[in-house]
Image (spheres, rainbow, N blue to C red):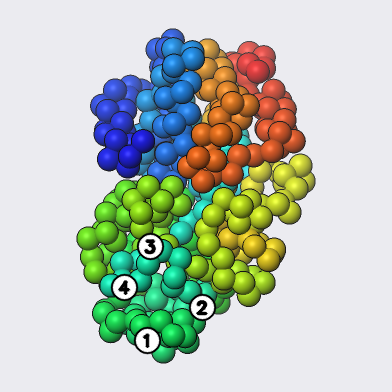
C-alpha cells in the first residue's frame, strides 16, 4: 500500500470514528504514525478473514495517549512506552506489537541512499543547529572522498506529539550530553532548529520537497518513498543501514520477562550490526473494559497479528516479536484486562 493510500485510509478512518463504543464489526484506535503502515496491512488482511474492520486515526503517539485516556477509542497506540506508575494512575496496561527503526533521511544533491555516514554527535549537532551546511568539516570527516555540496541544511522534525520523536530524542540524549541537558526526551520537545511536519507522512513530504533537508521517519516510509537514508555509526563504532536484520540485532538482547509493564527503550543498544535508533511500538488499553465485547475484539485482532501477521510485518521491514514474548503479552492480557465485575476477558 502506498503512503498516499495509507493517508487516504487514515482520513476515512477519522471520518468514520465514533466515540468509545465500536459496532460489532469494527474496532477503533488512534495514535502512532510509526506503526500505521503495519496496522493498516494487518487490518486489511484481518477484515478479509474475519469481517471485522479497524478505524484508526494516524495522529501521532501523543494524540493516541490522549484518546485512550479520554476513553474515546478502544485502544491507543504509542511508540513512547508509559511508565508503570502512569499506567496505574490512568487505569491502563500496555504491550509491544512490533519493533521498527527510525531512520534519518536526506535530500542532498548527488547523495544516494546508504552513502552518507553520520554518527550520533554530528546528527545531534545538526538538529541543534550547530552544523549548518552539508560540506561542514564535521560531516566531511565522516565521509572521506565524497563530494558534499555547500547547501544549507534544513532540519525537518515532527510538529505533533510523536513517538517517533521520542525514539529519536531518546537516541540523541544517549549519545549527546548537550542534547540531554538542553532538549531532552519526550513526544514533543523544544526543537532548537528546523521546520515541523505532521506525522511521518509530513516529515517525508517536507524532505522530498526541500533541497538540502534532513528528517527522520519510520523505515517503511523511507523505503516506500525511495528516500535517501543514511548509514549510522552504532555503539560498536560500525556504520550500518536500517535493515530489518540490524533492527532485530538491536532488540536481540532484551529479556522482556524481566521488564515491568514492558517499559523498555531499544536505542543505542550493543551489537556489531545493531541499528542504533530502534524502538518497539505499543498498544494502550484500559484494564477495566466497560464494553468487554469491544476489548475482546481488539485482543483477537492483535492475537491474529502476532500469529499470522509476521510476514506482513517483515514485508514492511518491521521485526515481529518472538513467540516467547507474545506468550508473555497474552498472559498479561489474561491477568490485567477484565470487565466491570473483575472477570478476565481473554
Disc 4 versus disc 2: nearer the observer: 4
Q: CA distance from mark 3 to mark 4?
A: 10 Å
Label number found at residue 110: 4
| Residues at marks 2 and 3 touching, judged by CB atoms closer than 8 Å | no
**Image quarter of residue 215:** bottom left
Q: CA distance from mark 2 to mark 3?
A: 20 Å
Judge whether residue 112 can be spotted in this image.
yes
Label 2 or label 3, whichever comes before in sequence order: 2
Q: Is residue 220 above or below residue 299?
A: below
Q: Is residue 89 above or below residue 309?
A: below
Disc 1 versus disc 2: nearer the observer: 1
Identify the element where label 4 is drawn.
loop
Which residue is most to the bottom?
Answer: 137
The image shows residue 246 at horizontal and vertical percentages of 60, 56
Residue drawn at 27 percent across, 54 percent down: 205
Residue drawn at 29 percent across, 52 percent down: 202
Left or right: residue 319 compared with residue 192: right
Q: Which residue is mark 2?
A: 121
Label 3 or label 4, whichever comes before in sequence order: 4
Q: Which residue is mark 1?
A: 136
Label 4 or label 1, whichever comes before in sequence order: 4
Identify the element where label 1 is drawn.
loop
Label 1 or label 3, whichever comes before in sequence order: 1
| Residues at marks 1 and 2 touching, judged by CB atoms closer than 8 Å | no
Q: Which residue is mark 3?
A: 228
Q: CA distance from mark 4 to mark 1?
A: 16 Å
Disc 4 versus disc 1: nearer the observer: 4
Residue drawn at 35 percent across, 71 percent down: 111
Amino acid at each position: 500500500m502506498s503512503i498516499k493510500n495509507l493517508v487516504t485510509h487514515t482520513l476515512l478512518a477519522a471520518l468514520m470514528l465514533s466515540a468509545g463504543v465500536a459496532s460489532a464489526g469494527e474496532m477503533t484506535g488512534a495514535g502512532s504514525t510509526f506503526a500505521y503502515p503495519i496496522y493498516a496491512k494487518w487490518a486489511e488482511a484481518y477484515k478479509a478473514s474475519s469481517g471485522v474492520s479497524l478505524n484508526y486515526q494516524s495522529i501521532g503517539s501523543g494524540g493516541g495517549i490522549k484518546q485512550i485516556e479520554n476513553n474515546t477509542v478502544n485502544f491507543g497506540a504509542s511508540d513512547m512506552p508509559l511508565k508503570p506508575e502512569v499506567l496505574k494512575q490512568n487505569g491502563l496496561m500496555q504491550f509491544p506489537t512490533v519493533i521498527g527503526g527510525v531512520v534519518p533521511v536526506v535530500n542532498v544533491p548527488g547523495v544516494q541512499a546508504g552513502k552518507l555516514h553520520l554518527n550520533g554527535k554530528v546528527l545531534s549537532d545538526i538538529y541543534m543547529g550547530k552544523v549548518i551546511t552539508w560540506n561542514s568539516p564535521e560531516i566531511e570527516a565522516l565521509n572521506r572522498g565524497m563530494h558534499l555540496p555547500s547547501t544549507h541544511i534544513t532540519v525537518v522534525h515532527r510538529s505533533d506529539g510523536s513517538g517517533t520523536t521520542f525514539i529519536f530524542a531518546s537516541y540523541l540524549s544517549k549519545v549527546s550530553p548537550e542534547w540531554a541537558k538542553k532538549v531532552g526526551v519526550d513526544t514533543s520537545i523544544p526543537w532548537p532548529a528546523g521546520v515541523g511536519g505532521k506525522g511521518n507522512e509530513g516529515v517525508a513530504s517536507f524532505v522530498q520537497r526541500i533541497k538540502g533537508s534532513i528528517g527522520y521517519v519510520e523505515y517503511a516510509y523511507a523505503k516506500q518513498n525511495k528516500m535517501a537514508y543514511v548509514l549510522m555509526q552504532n555503539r560498536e563504532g560500525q556504520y550500518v543501514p536500517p535493515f530489518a536484520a540490524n533492527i532485530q540485532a538491536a532488540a536481540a538482547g532484551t529479556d522482556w520477562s524481566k521488564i515491568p509493564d514492558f517499559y523498555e527503550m531499544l536505542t543505542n543498544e550493543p551489537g556489531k550490526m545493531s541499528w542504533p535508533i530502534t524502538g518497539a511500538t505499543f498498544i494502550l488499553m484500559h484494564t477495566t473494559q466497560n464494553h468487554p465485547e469491544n476489548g475482546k475484539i481488539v485482543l483477537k485482532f492483535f492475537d491474529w497479528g502476532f500469529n499470522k501477521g509476521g510476514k506482513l510485518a517483515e514485508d514492511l521491514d518491521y521485526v515481529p516479536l518472538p513467540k516467547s514474548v507474545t506468550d508473555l503479552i497474552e498472559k498479561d492480557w489474561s491477568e490485567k484486562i477484565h470487565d466491570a465485575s473483575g472477570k478476565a476477558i481473554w
